[in-house]
Structures are given as structure tokens and as C-alpha cells.
Image: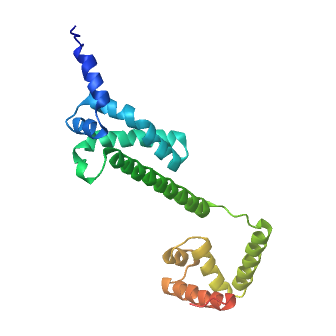
Amino acid sequence: MLVVMDPDVGDALSGMRDTPEQRLARVATGDKRAFAELYDATAPRIFGLIRRLLVDPAQAEEVTQEVFLEIWQTATRYKQERGSAISWMLTMAHRRAVDRIRASQASRDRDTKIGIRDYDREYDQVAEHVEISMEGERVKRAIAGLTELQRQAVELAYFGGLSHSEIAAELHVPVGTIKTRIRDGMIRLRDALGVTS
């Protein structure tokens, strides 16, 4: 009795008997069915390796998909004389998983550095206020030590924001005189505040 087999069933049975190397050779020619067979036969093992390395199941699934995409795209590079197809695919999976670990670690390190940089340390507002007040008092005493003419010129220039010519017009004196008063006043302030240049 002659049994006639459906060609699709025959192809499926022959695919089940193919070795991973044979399937990979067919994948290299763009055979989608061979890729599906290769996936079904090897995905649990590849996912298991990646899962052990990454721990996080969602990342492991993602990396497994990346590995199979790479297998599809680079199947032509597989050389049987260099080792088994399973070894080639597991090496690829291991490399991808390690790359993901390194990228995750680099991202955590970067986030930590940014967090440390942006950390707003608490400070003593009272001490800061006292320090600013004390510095303000020192400046007031130093300004009080200027002559009346120097004080006027310095205050109009630095607190009033006027230019030399505007100060000269307001005080009815030559610009050169204003420049001299400001220069002399600044020298006395610097000395009084203990500023070294």
C-alpha cells in the first residue's frame, strides 16, 4: 500500500529532523520556516542563559528577541567548522546579555553621579544670614570711612549705576575729578576691607 503524504507535512517532518546547523544554513538563505523551527528548538535554552545573567525576566525577553533578530540578520556569518550552531547562538546570547548588564550599570553610575551633583545639601540659613549681615556691616563701616566726596562718587557709581559722565553732571564737577574720587575711594575701601589684588 502506497501512502501519499501532504507536501507541507513532509516538509514539516523533514524540518523536525534537521540539525540546528542545517536549519541555520536554511535561515542564511532567508527561509522563514527554518527560522521558526530554529526558534522553537533553541529559544528556551537561549532565554534560560540570558535569564540567568540578567535576572530581570522582562529584560531577558527583550535581549532574547534581540539575539534572534541578530541570528536572522547574520546567519550567513556562521561557519560550521568553527563550532556548533548552538554554541554560536549561545555565545551571541551571552555577549548580548553582558552588553545589557554593562549598559545598565553605566546608566546607574551616570544617574548616581547626577544625583550626587544635584544633591542640594542642607545649610544653616541662620549662619548664612548672620555672615551676610556681618559682611554688610563691614562694608557700611568701610564706606563711612571715606571722605564725603569719595562716598558720594562711589555710591552713585556702584549703588546708583551711573556712569562717570552722569555723576559729573549731577555733582557739577569735571569727569576727571569723578574718576579720581572713585579711584581713591576704592583704594581706601579695599584697604579697609583687607582685600588684596
Q: Is residue 144 visible?
A: yes
Q: Is residue 62 visible?
A: no
In the displayed structure, 97 sits above or below 132; it is: above
Residue 25 vs residue 105, the one in the foreground = 25
Q: Residue at x 51, y 50 (%)?
A: 53
Residue 161 vs residue 80, the one in the foreground = 80
Q: Which quarter of the picture shows residue 40?
A: top left
Residue 184 vs residue 31, the one in the foreground = 31
Q: Residue at x 77, y 66 (%)?
A: 125
Quadrant holding the N terminus: top left
**How many numbered badges does the structure rendering display?**
0
Q: Residue at x 31, y 42 (%)?
A: 71
In the displayed structure, 32 sits above or below 61; it is: above
Q: Position of residue 74 (x, y in %)?
A: 26, 44
Quadrant holding the C terminus: bottom right
- Looking at the image, residue 1 sits to the left or right of residue 135; the answer is left
In the displayed structure, 190 sits above or below 10; it is: below
Q: Position of residue 10 (x, y in %)?
A: 25, 20
Q: Residue at x 22, y 10 (%)?
A: 4
Return the residue found at the far front.
Answer: 1
Q: Position of residue 160 (x, y in %)?
A: 60, 70
Residue 97 vs residue 17, the one in the foreground = 17
Q: Position of residue 146 (x, y in %)?
A: 68, 87
Return the residue found at the far top.
Answer: 1
- Looking at the image, residue 31 sits to the left or right of residue 151; the answer is left
- Looking at the image, residue 41 sits to the left or right of residue 175; the answer is left
